[in-house]
Amino acid sequence: SQQGEEDPQALSIQEGENATMNCSYKTSINNLQWYRQNSGRGLVHLILIRSNEREKHSGRLRVTLDTSKKSSSLLITASRAADTASYFCATFGGGVGKSTFGDGTTLTVKP
Amino acid sequence: KAGVTQTPRYLIKTRGQQVTLSCSPISGHRSVSWYQQTPGQGLQFLFEYFSETQRNKGNFPGRFSGRQFSNSRSEMNVSTLELGDSALYLCASSLDWEIGELFFGEGSRLTVL
């Protein structure tokens, strides 16, 4: 199975609401990154959090990392219809020698 | 600066044929990695090249191969195509694959009939 597993698989909210996605992983890491993918397109990097960091902000995004639980969460505040996309967490480093992406959370933001 | 360029964007092949996909990274990026995305398996890592050397490899059969040229452009090749190879193939470039952010191209969508 994938190193990173997102939860929930799908999330539907109204514009203006907050969206929270969770990611769990199995091995030690150097960093964890979140990406967004609009349907059938390439992935866009959102935010990177290093293993020695606990929280990071970027605009309307807030990412937390709990290395003891091997989990991360992505919070999107005040969501917009344009945030509709799939969101993936990806783990890097930690001796695994390869990048691993989770299965993704599909977010639908209704106007 | 220009982003990651993948060609071709769409292609249709038949079983048994081979295919070559190309990726031009962002100028200055020496790391290029490749991924296969399918509805059933999600995003799977294929391999990563840095300065013309394959540094990391995922769990794909030998039919999947790649290379990187001195200008950092990369190609991946799939021989003896199978129906299950139908997928979106994504290329990403970065300054350092295991540390930094990845910049993805729009992908090459391969359909095998």
Image (cartoon, rainbow, N blue to C red):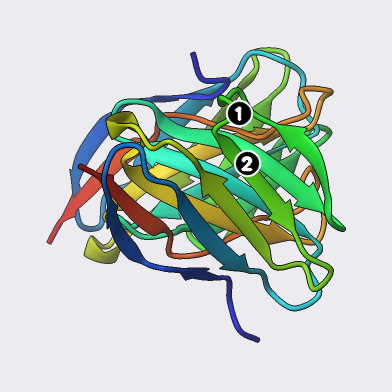
- Of A62 and B17, which appears nearest the observer? B17
x and y, in percent, of residue A88 in the image: 46, 40
x and y, in percent, of residue A35 in the image: 51, 49
Q: Is residue A27 above or below residue A46?
A: above
Residue at horizontal 54%, vertical 33%? B63
Mark 1 secondary-structure assignment: loop
Amino acid type shown at disc 1: Gly
x and y, in percent, of residue A81 in the image: 22, 62
Residue at horizontal 81%, vertical 74%? B28
| Residue labelled with disc 2 | B65
Mark 1 falls within which chain? B
Residue at horizontal 39%, vertical 53%? A37
- Assess whether mark 2 and mark 1 are in contact (beta carbons under 8 angstroms): yes
Q: Is residue B87 left or right of residue A3?
A: left
Mark 2 secondary-structure assignment: strand
Amino acid type shown at disc 2: Ser
Q: Is residue B6 left or right of residue A105?
A: right
Residue at horizontal 62%, vertical 58%? B75
Work out whether disc 1 and disc 2 sit on a shared chain.
yes
